[in-house]
Image (cartoon, rainbow, N blue to C red):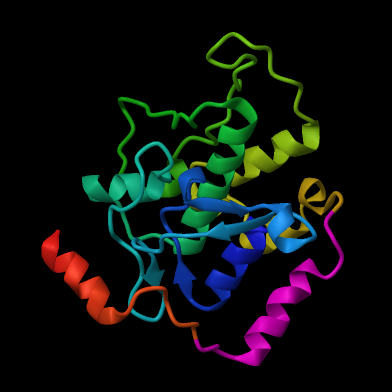
Amino acid sequence: QLIVALDYSHRMGVFNRDLKLQHLLMESAAATDEFLVIKLIDFGDCKNASESTPDSYVGTGNYMSPEVLFTTFGGPKYDGRKADVWLVGCCLYRMLFGADVKIPLDPEWNCASDPSEWPQNAVKTPPSRLGNGELLPPVSAECMDFLNRTLQVCPSRRITMDDVWEHPWFQTNLPAGNREYNDALIAEGPQDLPDGIQTDEELKGILDMA
């Protein structure tokens, strides 16, 4: 569901840039009568691709992709789609290992240099235990391959969203029609948003009092 939401966002020309577990809401199965529904929230740091190539230092530090992180040191502009793929890997890593991804920084590494010279990937030896000492279950080779491909430090070596869809681990038990779901939504065109719980005037009043 997260990939479906992110894929739709990218196809509409919007890069999230601050995807993290705190921005994923879950609607209970009881509310939908079928299954848990994940909802992606907070597009405050998103970038519209029609405006310009992303070059801003935005996001959350322990999730931030290397190319976004290094804009503060004079790094080059970056591909927002690849930055979001890194965030997907960070979310999965956090759920599997209960830890943050550690970017392998080198003191001699010139961050503003050619990204192709950056280190290979950020997944070296994942933790085997949680912070409380609890032993973690083993992770399949296909899952580790997915993590390694999403967490390539160099953006050009990182997989694309199309590659994510085709990866064997992601394909496992993938419900039929998932990829075509966005095709149908995009074909329908922009939809009118439902009215919010609060009016524009009420929201303005809240902001004025803040």
Quarter the C terminus occupies = bottom left
Q: Which residues are magenta?
A: 174-192
On the rendered structure, is 30 left or right of 177?
left
Image location (x, y in percent) of residue 21: 51, 44
Indicate left or right for 191 with 72 as reference: right
Q: Is residue 43 left or right of residue 200?
A: right
Q: Is residue 144 above or below residue 38?
A: above
The foreground one among 104 and 189 is 189
Which x, y percent locates residue 181? 74, 75
Residue 37 visible, this angle: yes
Q: In the rendered view, does 39 fall on the left or right side of 179? A: left
Q: Residue at x 46, y 29 (%)?
A: 102
Of residues 18 and 34, which is closer to you in this image?
A: 34
Give the percent coordinates (x, y) of residue 92: 61, 40
Q: Residue furthest top?
A: 133
Q: Residue 202, how many percent across, how many down?
A: 25, 75
Q: Is residue 151 visible?
A: no
Q: Does residue 12 belong to the magenta stretch?
A: no
- Where 80 sits versus 26, above or below? below
* Picture quadrant where residue 109 is located: top left
